[in-house]
Amino acid sequence: MAQQSKSVRSSPLFGVAASLIIVLVGALLATWIQTGAGAAQVKEVMYLGADNGINDAYIWIPNGVTAKNPAPGILAVSGFNNSKEYMSNTALELARRGFVVLDIDMEAHGHSDPVSPGDGAFGALDGLNYLRSLPIVDKNNVGEVGMSLGGIAIDLAAAADPGDVKSLYFMDSNCVATCTATIDEGWSVGTGTEFANKTAGGAPGVTTGDQVKSSAFAEKWAGITSPLVPGQLYGSVAAGTAREYWEHFGDHAFSTDDPASIGDVISWFGLTLGGSTASGQIWPLKELGTGLGFLGLVLFLFTLGAWLLRSKFFESLNESLPAYKGNTGRNWWIFAVITALLGPVTFNWAFDTAFNANWGYWESVSTGFTFWLAVLGVITIVILTAGYYALARPAGASLVSYGLTWEGVGLDWRKIGKSALLALSVVAAGYFVLWVADSWMHIDFRVWVLTLKTSDLQHFPLMVAYAIPIALYFIPISVVLHGTLRPKNGEATLRREMGTNILILLLGAVGLLVWYYVPGEWFGAALNADIGLGMINFIGLLALLPIVAGLMTFFFRKTGHVYVGAFMCTFFITWYLTAAMTLLSIG
């Protein structure tokens, strides 16, 4: 009986079920907290905006709010390359305190249409008009909160309709049109922000977040002639001249997931718009739930793939590992270090080149990352080719030992095609799991900047286009890891080999992030804003690199070839990039 129980637990089908249970538990927790633990209803709404564009948003309606009992309304707008889910932590906390919150996807972000010229405020003016049209909203008590580009959006919207907005809050952003207007304005900036100078209106000499409060821009905004004192109220709420400034620890992106920053938003709108009281902040439990959903989905990819390999159709892909003919001793360490450093060393140049050029005007951030991966792929192929002829081939290596070809057959296109089909089937099943969670529970799977979202017909053609250059990276890097850098001369356990490959890919990325962020976050040094957007998105690699290293290693050990794992990583990363990134091009 004990042996039978152990056999069941080791079955891939048991793993599939267990991973889906993790997803379900996480999704249920996240959707419950999303409602403010039952304090509000959350609905997805779509409405027509400028140029007949369809705008997408979530709306929080607190319990007891009706047309006969309207409540203050707040428009929430996330930053560039973000979607409405980024502001959901703030939105649910405001809803717990009695505010109707409309959390929008800006134009060309999330599921909102890309339109030109649009409403002149990146969709915020359309959102403001929609919010004010709702009978459940007290039209004399409306505020807006925006992060980064979302702050500029709400500012433009407020300037376009003077008198329609009573209170604004700029979250790691700044005003551009209402700085001296009769509107109560709160403002917070991260001390380690990448964009200190821009946040301070381009004020000379401002290079770090903690210098923003001493800038001429900040003093003019508050109507004073001395540096701002964080947490001190200037002006009068009753007169519409109130100004208050806060600082919080962390970089630019941290503000949407920072208890201090969200707490300041709550305090500001409580002061200027009213609302009820609710103690504490519960949004971290939502992030725990969406994080569990992400974890469960990743485990689902492993277990479903393993289960499908047992099916009659895919069972021919199960083959023994080829004999290891790769690097050993000092050569192993040399090529491991090269592999670890190659990505970080090339990232900023490659990302910025493609992001600024944005050939074809697609998703500028996705184009930056895809070009970087393609450059890595080409360099890796060159190094692999040189190493093969100089070292590996004389030692008896072949493309068979690299996991690329089959003994006596060469390239088996039938099996390569099956490998692609298996990988696509697994990732498509994972997408379906997320689609169910998104459609029924209004959540994505995320932890801070690591976000996995559903896509739409606007993004799908880009997935096809980006997949090819992304594959150009994953196939050769899989050859490097499994043909030339297997630990213990190819005799390591799966756990050790997986751990080794994760470390090879991860250590260089950690080093780049430490080099960039630690001086600014902890020692007050200026961060390079010119590469800030790329580095913010690079943070997600702390989770993505272990995932892709694990997938490539796991399925290489299952099939003896690189294709299933490389294709699965290609489809997964293509989905991750294109579904989450904006169609708004600033390159």
Image (cartoon, rainbow, N blue to C red):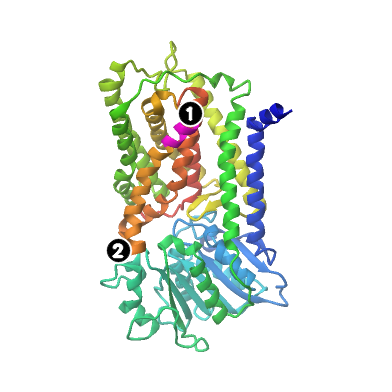
Q: Earlier in the sequence, mark 1 or mark 2?
A: 1
* Label 2 residue SS: loop
Callout 2 amino acid: Ala
Query: Depth-wise, is mark 1 or mark 2 nearer the camera?
Result: 1
Q: Quadrant of residue 369?
A: top left
Report the residue at 38% width, 19% height from top: 399
Question: In the image shown, does 582 or 449 lie closer to the viewer?
Answer: 449
Label 2 sits on residue: 526
Report the residue at 50% width, 37% height from top: 571
Q: Main secondary structure of the magenta part?
A: helix
Left or right: 324 as drawn, with respect to 106: left
Return the x and y of residue 8 as percentages of the image width and height. Answer: 68, 30
* Local crowd size for mark 1, using a 10 Å CA cut-off: few (<14), some (14–19), many (≥20): few
Return the x and y of residue 89 as percentages of the image width and height. Answer: 56, 63
Position of residue 71 relative to residue 532, above or below, is below
Q: Which residues are magenta?
A: 493-501
Return the x and y of residue 426 as percentages of the image width and height. Answer: 57, 34
* Local crowd size for mark 2, using a 10 Å CA cut-off: few (<14), some (14–19), many (≥20): many
Return the x and y of residue 427 as percentages of the image width and height. Answer: 55, 37
Callout 1 amino acid: Thr
Left or right: 539 as drawn, with respect to 335: right
Visible residue check, residue 504? yes
* Label 1 residue SS: loop
Q: Residue furthest front?
A: 2
Label 1 sits on residue: 493
Q: Per the image, is 51 magenta?
A: no
Report the residue at 63% width, 23% height from top: 311
Q: Quadrant of residue 411?
A: top left
Visible residue check, residue 464? no
